Image: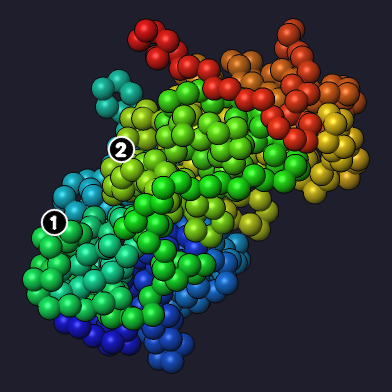
Amino acid sequence: MQFLTADEAVSLVPDAATVLVDGSGGGVNEPATVLAALERRFLETAAPRDLTVLHVSGMGSGNADGIDHLAHEGLTRKVIGGHWAWSRRMQELAVDEKIQAYCLPQGTLSHLLREIAGGRPGPLSQVGLGTSVDPRLDGGRLNRSAVDPVNQIVELGGKEWIHTPSFPIDVAIVRGTTADERGNISMEGEGLLAETLAAAQAAKASGGLVIVQVRTRVPYGEIAADTVRIPGVLVDAIIVDPQQRLSHATDRDALLEGRERAEAIEIPPIPFTVRKVIARRAAQQVRAQEIVNLGFGMPDGVAAVLAEARLDQEVTFTVEQGHVGGVPAGGSDFGLTRNHQSSIDAGAQFDWYDGGGLDLAVLSFAQVDAAGNVNVSRFGRRLAGIGGFVNISQGAKRVVFVGTFEAGAPPRLDGKGAIEIDGGGTRKFVAEVEQISFSGALAAEQGKDVLYVSERAVFALSPEGLVLTEVAPGLDAERDVIARMGFRPVISPDLCEMDPAIFTDGSFPLRLPATEQKENAR
């Protein structure tokens, strides 16, 4: 084990290496100093070349950082990522067929690292069946250059499974907070545990190198043994960067780092807009004492609506990066939480999610089709990727998808219960989604409770496909909803008006019904 400069450390990366970079979007846990040095080495020396880059979560902020440091022709040959939205330059390389591009579920990749670490053949999972991950559809491929298969269908116990084969990791680049003289790493100043340990173990099991970026160097013995997250025996090189930030947006925050707790965390009310209308309708699906995951973007409005009604303490929020409880952060700090009850490795969190640990997931939609399929991952030249979406949507007992009915044409709200719509919006309920991120057919076959909530209408999933169940007050179902869709949904015989209170500015009457399990327990 050596303490090196970033430039010295990246000189150890050989051509054609498989490089694993661990971290999360918005610069959280991002080993930014090492990535910048690797980019600098390539621009100055044209080496290393032809890397295969693996990243479990999205990384970067969309500003040529994160994984985009490696977005250069010749430097990177192949990318397997769980999420691509933060990496605009890498997306461009993929769309222009300059690299082989793949996207697999965040949970699958998280579990893959543990499989590689244990010398096992790779994870078996039903997560992704019927979606773009399924090898009978896209197989995780994002472009034509992605010719090599990265997964396969196998049958075991009379069921179909997706097998993602293990492969060697030549270099793992990860981040911690403090390193002692023997290379032991603690993470008390990080926002997540992520896959840090599994990443290091996977590289060592492959005979590879482990490069760790930290903020502080201390003498041996100053890190308590039970706070060591990466044992020194797994570490080859350590880079100390005293300027290391918690994320791109936040320098230091003891609450987000989990080192302090506040007596109370206020979630400020959101303005009365279409977003609030949708969040209110989604919040009506929440039950008391449920374990909930709120996706990135519009879904986090549900937390604000619950808080405004003083009901946020009645549920337990979780995030896929490993936190349980507390108040999830938004924006580029997504994945971080304040006042969380616990933090566990991301792989363990996905074990829980895949095993049905979530009662409810509220997730965004970008496109929906007649079968109830949802696309959040690909739109023309934009490759957003799926992140934890597939694990969460397939594992949760109930799912609410939220989004505006059309893109780019927000309706007018008078705050008194009326909604007026104009033309000119881009259709989001389409004849066929560009890519399947959520399989309506599989969910319907399983009898999953799925709702699709917009400001204009609400739909439910049935074996016959999408069913129109509610329409906003004052709107005509045929003229204002169905005529603006790319297909004709099934019309519920009990079609009704959405609750007018949702569309009224001011206090919103909301109560959380007891869960069926709780009621039965009484």
In the figure, 334 relative to 425: above or below?
below
Q: Mark on residue 351?
A: 2
Q: Please tell me how crowded label 1 is: few (under 14), some (14-19), or many (20+) other residues with Cα within 10 Å.
A: few
468 lies left or right of 175: right
Q: Can residue 137 be seen in this view?
A: no
Task: List x then y, in percent, for residue 508.
Answer: 69, 29
Locate residue 475, reporting x and y percent. 87, 25
Q: Is 122 on the left or on the right of 39, as rendered?
A: left
Element at label 1: helix
Task: Confirm whether residue 293 shows in the render.
Answer: yes
Q: Where is residue 454 in the image (x, y as percent from the top left)?
A: 71, 33
Question: Which residue in the structure is indicated by mark 1?
Answer: 226
Check disc 1 and give the amino acid type: Asp
| Direction from residue 338 to residue 181 in the image, left or right | left
Query: Residue at left 53%, top 17%?
Result: 513
Q: What element carries label 2?
A: helix
Tell me the crowding category of disc 2: few under 14, some 14 to 19, or many 20 or more residues within 10 angstroms, Cα based.
some
Q: Quadrant of the N terminus?
A: bottom left
Kind of residue sitting beneath label 2: Asp
Tell me the residue at 20%/83% (across/down): 3
Of 300 and 160, which appears nearest the observer?
300
